[in-house]
Amino acid sequence: MTQDDPVGSSRDPDFLRSARPLLELYASYFRPEVRGFERVPDAGPMLVVGNHSGGQLPPDVPILLTAWWRERGEEEPIFTMMHSFFMSLPGIGPIMERCGGLEAGVDNAEAILDSGGILLDYPGGDHEVFRPWSERNRIDFGGRTGVIRLALRKQVPIVPVVSVGAHETLFVLSRGEELAKRLPIAKKLRVSVVPLVLGPPFGIVPGGIPTFPLPAKVTVELLDPIDWSEHYGPEAAEDSEIVQACYDELTQAMQAGMDILAAERKYPIIG
């Protein structure tokens, strides 16, 4: 295993260079503004932890990654944890792998960090990416502390990243958590929500059907790193009180950063 090829990844910098213009064209639809690269450590290992927004076609990932490649180069080993359902889609999974996408899991995450790489993770997953419109400017990881335990166990810093606007590209009417508990297919697909969304061109549809995103302006900010290794050793990953305190510290810092970005917006969608 090498820094450029953890867990046998097929991440391809040459492919990224050729694909970046197309991805940047897509990202430009959202008039993106990405700030704070001066706060990011010069090299990994590190965790980059973001709030996830935008429903079934979240623009936050391509917006951040295209800016990252532009600022720091495609050679830097940054990888993104992705849901197994998304990675299993025919024709989609292999492309995501070439872009640095890996199926979410502890083994993959640890291998990336052990190799000195950078791991981009959205702990809120489907729970957060389908939060209702009224909660669009709220950090909601749903109490998921895996990323905290990972940072403590591997003694790596977390770089929080917050964004506003991506959750204004559609209207999430309901997460459908209760429905997900009752549907066997939801358990098979490892999803915790069966959402209902509103967006063009179909109107109100289940979250599995793509809608055309509204042209909301998306602003992203990388915040100051948090490094708990200065205070705790790897054994802290098994201490529930320490894990909860670190979770609270991270989510509160991210909420404060999101509140600042949200206060800059005069109007939804327009920005």
Image (cartoon, rainbow, N blue to C red):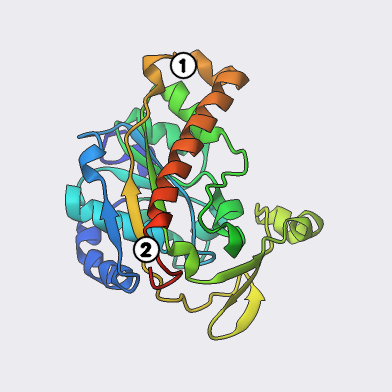
The image shows residue 92 at horizontal and vertical percentages of 44, 65
Q: Please name the amino acid that badge 2 sits on.
A: Val
Q: State the image quarter where residue 157 is shown.
A: top left
Dot 1 amino acid type: Pro
The circle on residue 234 is 1
Quadrant showing the C terminus: bottom left
Total marks in image:
2
On the image, which quarter does residue 70 sit in? bottom left
Tell me which residue sits at (43%, 31%) in the image: 110
Residue nearest the observer in this picture, 93 or 164: 164
Q: Which residue is mark 2?
A: 218
How crowded is the residue under tag 2: few (<14 C-alpha within 10 Å), some, or many (20+)?
A: many
The disc, 1 or 2, on the residue closer to the chain's N-terminal end is 2
Residue 168, image x and y in percent?
48, 68
The picture quadrant where one finds residue 1 is: top left
Q: Residue at image x 36%, y 68%?
A: 217
Residue at 20% from the left image edge and 47% from the top image edge: 75
